[in-house]
């Protein structure tokens, strides 16, 4: 088992582990195995792409361990561009899965003010929502929404802040990569289906989430803007991380800490979310299930959202690091056909009798 108390400064990997990624160098794209010191073993002779590794995962993992032991690196992580480790996965995101995060969002974000009861303070809303959300651990059901692989970018690519909307926000999350999949999985089977873990920043333009012109009340398509899903730099096989205890999410904007939270403070565990999904969709090898965001979004930091020129630095213990420059979108003078919608003013909810 890996020495989980030792993280290599070059890669963010634990000693004794490796990561699986997709890399570009000199116009060539290849699957690679990243060693803790930063060396990359080219997997092209063995696998056409990383997605193929997760088909027949249990056999392939043993083979990868032999490759990591026996072959010499032919490239270094510092010298290549990290692409999304899996190019076109089905991507499913857990929502409302950290109680503190949900309570912060509903007490501080402007798009959630319609849920405020008459006379409530921010702290009143926070405490009410926290209690309700935390209670879902005992009697609730996971909530999952799907998102688009066209929003994926690599761990060091630029993030383009879209022309529409004023509040682009971050959400660093743990991603779970599916290996052997199936339908109606037990919790033990769901846990066994996890092939690896990866880091995902689930960005969204939060001021355009709320829509009063439709019955559903929300439109989350702004979470799928181009470049809004930095993924990687690599996937770490699950056998190297037998427990998530002690792993932390850390996200900084221009060096200022925004998110710093234990990864495993879930309402629903990865196994529970996967079991839920197996009852509703067909999970495929290489699919990614994001576990939801811990607290620390822009509204929690005084309404500090992303701006042109910001640098996001992010890490999850043992899963590497991301560094992304934010830049404003240039739409070349085009005029949007629809642009932004105008919401009707929300009325506060009546106080409970």
Image (tube, rainbow, N blue to C red):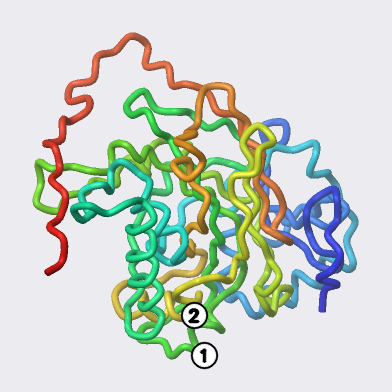
- The residue at the point 80 percent across, 39 percent down is 78
The disc placed on residue 271 is 2
Left or right: 352 with respect to 108? left
> Image quadrant of residue 95?
bottom left
Say what secondary structure mark 2 lies in: helix
Q: Which mark is residue 5?
A: none
Q: Is residue 121 left or right of residue 186?
A: left
Question: Residue 131 appears in which quarter of the rendering?
Answer: bottom left
Q: What residue is disc 1 on?
A: 188
Query: In the displayed structure, would residue 338 be above or below residue 69?
Result: above
Question: Do residues under tags 2 and 1 come within 8 Å of each other at their CB atoms?
Answer: yes
Q: Is residue 228 left or right of residue 111?
A: right
Q: CA distance from mark 2 to mark 1?
A: 7 Å
Q: Position of residue 126 (x, y in %)?
A: 38, 59
**Residue closer to the observer: 316 or 350:** 350
Q: Which of the image's four quarters has the C terminus?
A: bottom left
Q: Position of residue 294 (x, y in %)?
A: 52, 58
Is residue 265 visible in the rendered structure shown here?
yes
Give percent across and percent down for residue 79: 80, 36
Query: How many neighbours does mark 2 have within 10 angstroms: few (below 14), some (14-19), or many (20 or more)?
Result: many
> Residue at (59%, 42%) from the top-left corner?
154
Q: Residue at x 39, y 66 (%)?
A: 130
Quadrant that contains the N terminus: bottom right
């Amino acid at each position: 088992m890996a020495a989980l108390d030792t993280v290599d400064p070059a890669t963010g990997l634990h000693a004794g582990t490796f990561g699986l990624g997709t890399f570009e160098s000199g116009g060539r794209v290849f699957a690679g195995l990243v060693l803790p010191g930063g060396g990359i073993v080219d997997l092209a002779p063995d696998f056409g792409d990383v997605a193929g590794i997760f088909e027949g995962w249990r056999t392939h993992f043993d083979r990868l361990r032999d490759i990591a032991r026996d072959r010499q690196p032919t490239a270094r992580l510092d010298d290549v561009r990290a692409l999304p480790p899996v190019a076109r996965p089905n991507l499913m995101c857990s929502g409302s899965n950290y109680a503190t995060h949900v309570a912060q969002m509903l007490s501080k974000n402007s798009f959630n003010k319609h849920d405020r009861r008459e006379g409530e303070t921010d702290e009143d809303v926070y405490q009410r929502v926290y209690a309700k959300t935390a209670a879902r651990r005992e009697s609730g059901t996971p909530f999952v929404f799907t998102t688009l692989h066209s929003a994926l970018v690599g761990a060091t690519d630029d993030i383009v802040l879209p022309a529409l909307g004023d509040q682009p926000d971050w959400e660093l999350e743990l991603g779970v990569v599916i290996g052997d999949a199936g339908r109606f999985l037990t919790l033990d089977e769901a846990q066994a289906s996890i092939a690896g873990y990866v880091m995902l920043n689930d960005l969204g333009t939060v001021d355009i989430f709320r829509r009063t012109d439709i019955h559903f009340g929300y439109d989350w398509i702004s979470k799928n803007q181009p470049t809004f899903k930095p993924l990687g730099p690599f996937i770490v096989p699950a056998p190297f991380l037998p427990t998530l205890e002690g792993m932390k999410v850390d996200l900084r904007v221009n060096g200022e800490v925004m998110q710093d939270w234990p990864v495993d403070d879930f309402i629903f565990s990865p196994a529970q979310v996967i079991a839920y999904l197996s009852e509703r969709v067909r999970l495929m090898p290489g699919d990614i299930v994001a576990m939801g965001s811990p607290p620390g979004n822009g509204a929690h930091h005084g309404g500090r959202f992303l701006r042109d020129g910001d640098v996001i630095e992010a890490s999850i213990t043992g899963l590497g690091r991301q560094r992304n420059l934010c830049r404003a979108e240039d739409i070349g003078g085009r005029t949007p056909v629809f642009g932004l919608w105008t919401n009707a003013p929300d009325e506060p909810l009546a106080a409970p009798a």
